[in-house]
Image (cartoon, rainbow, N blue to C red):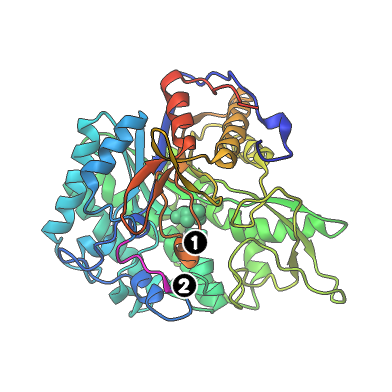
Amino acid sequence: MGTQGNADYRDSGLVFPDGFIFGSATASYQVEGAAQEDGRGPSIWDTFSHTPGKVWNGDTGDIAADHYHRLDEDLDLMKSLGLHSYRFSIAWPRIQANGRGPANPAGVAFYERLVDGLLARGIRPIATLYHWDLPQALEDEGGWANRDTAYAFADYARIMGEALGDRVDTWTTLNEPWCSAYLGYGSGAHAPGRTDGAAALAAVHHLNLAHGLAVTALREVVSNDPDFSITLNLHVLRGEGESGPEAVRQIDALANRVFLGPLLDGAYPADVFNDTRGVTDWAFILPGDTEIIHQPLDVLGVNYYSTTLVRVWDGVSERQNSDGHKDVGGSPWPGADRIEFMQQPGPYTEMGWNIEPAGLEELLVSLHESYPNQPLMITENGAAFVDELVQGLDGPAVHDEERTDYLRRHFTAAHRAMARGVDLRGYQVWSLMDNFEWGYGYSKRFGIVHVDYDSLARTPKDSAKWYAELIANGVLPPAND
Ligand code: FCB
């Protein structure tokens, strides 16, 4: 039995084009562990996860999936699944313990070993420079609310470009700057846990700037003609009732256009300045910044999990706040105090996120319509469900039908978008293995490979086997039911 609903998104036999890049993704703090080894400095996530009450169950990334020590085993696992690509992130504090100064050779060596190990197995390295683990020393100087952090990031990008710029296939500057800015500095649900709307909006701009500076720095030092990219978690918005369109406009500006505008059009959307004028005057945007941010992108990375339903609060009824993020009190939406986030129809994943594959098709098509010449890549999609490790005749197994069904529906959606003309280059399933799910710790499992957190043993789930079959044939396997 699969998940109910959305039955029309369960096609079988769909053929993906030759060259479509099937891969899987992880992020440094979520999988590596070895938090204090080989000269790694503390990141904001070390500080945050070690602060009581910030992460469920007091979980930390100290050990995580121990990927740092199990690199060869994990590389072999990727090879056995037939992955075409592996999207990983580089821990900035392994490279520069305090976020500045010369590279730490041991940190660089780990990523050289990772990239060389991928290439030796015929797997493309897709490297993300920043998946949220800011060196704590830079946070102590103001973090992403401080303009200097963008320049420090460009220096770090240059170091990595010099080290791996002959081997990495795709450089992604930032993963989901929305989360870094609004969850890190607005709601406080993520590290560094600040709750200051003005700082969150400054962080938005400095992250955009960091992207532009990093691409510029990388271009100067790489030698193998890689793709440059950034990954965004664009919000697929639906409006409810009469006020729906206005609510959608406001959240679209804050969540999507504040990134897409400067990145792809070379300008911030004017309405975001107006909507947030009670929070900040945006004086942190200096002349020339938008030109720096506006770099050609070889591929735009898209992370998609679910949709968002909004309306303008009437000021009378009980305020709805189901925006799908851990609610810790602060708002991730500076200047949008009157917007309500509505509960959406199920089915849901274990995160409480609604399962809506049509949203992925809609997102890809709308990006293609707005930016017809922009190649796209799904850099994350996947789902957390409660998994049970069982002992079968052939050894341990996880029969995760719901995850397989979720993936089937979303691959179907991606295929439909391609049939409508979207230039979609590939799909990186989140995640290769169970890992530290930020504020939720180890309570949510997204992996297609199960990790036993006591023994650290890896067990490919049924979804991994299903994915391996899809990759091997380039065709969506038939459904079981
Ligand atoms: C995304 C993050 C990724 C993971 C998934 C579930 O927002 O980029 O690290 O936590 O959500």
Residue shown at 53%/55% (left/top)?
A: 259
Residue shown at 31%/74% (left/top)?
A: 136
Q: Earlier in the sequence, mark 1 or mark 2?
A: 2
Is 186 part of what is drawn in magenta? no
Horizontal side of 203 relative to 82 (left or right) equals right
Please determine whether, in this image, residue 111 is positioned above or below residue 253: above
Is 61 part of what is drawn in magenta? yes
Crowd rating for badge 1 (residues with CA inside 10 Å; few <14, some 14–19, many 20+): many
Crowd rating for badge 2 (residues with CA inside 10 Å; few <14, some 14–19, many 20+): few
Please determine whether, in this image, residue 139 is positioned above or below residue 112: below
Q: Position of residue 431 (x, y in %)?
A: 44, 46
The secondary element bearing badge 2 is classed as helix
Q: Is residue 194 something one can see in this rendering? A: yes
Q: Amino acid at mark 1?
A: Ser
Horizontal side of 358 relative to 52 (left or right) equals right
Q: Position of residue 385 (x, y in %)?
A: 56, 50
Residue shown at 82%/74% (left/top)?
A: 318
The secondary element bearing badge 1 is classed as helix
Q: Do the numbered discs 1 and 2 sit on residues whose CB atoms are within 8 Å?
A: yes
Magenta residues, start to end? 58-63
Q: Amino acid at mark 2?
A: Asn
Quadrant of the drawing holding the C terminus:
top right
Quadrant of the drawing holding the N terminus:
top right
Q: Which residue is mark 2?
A: 57
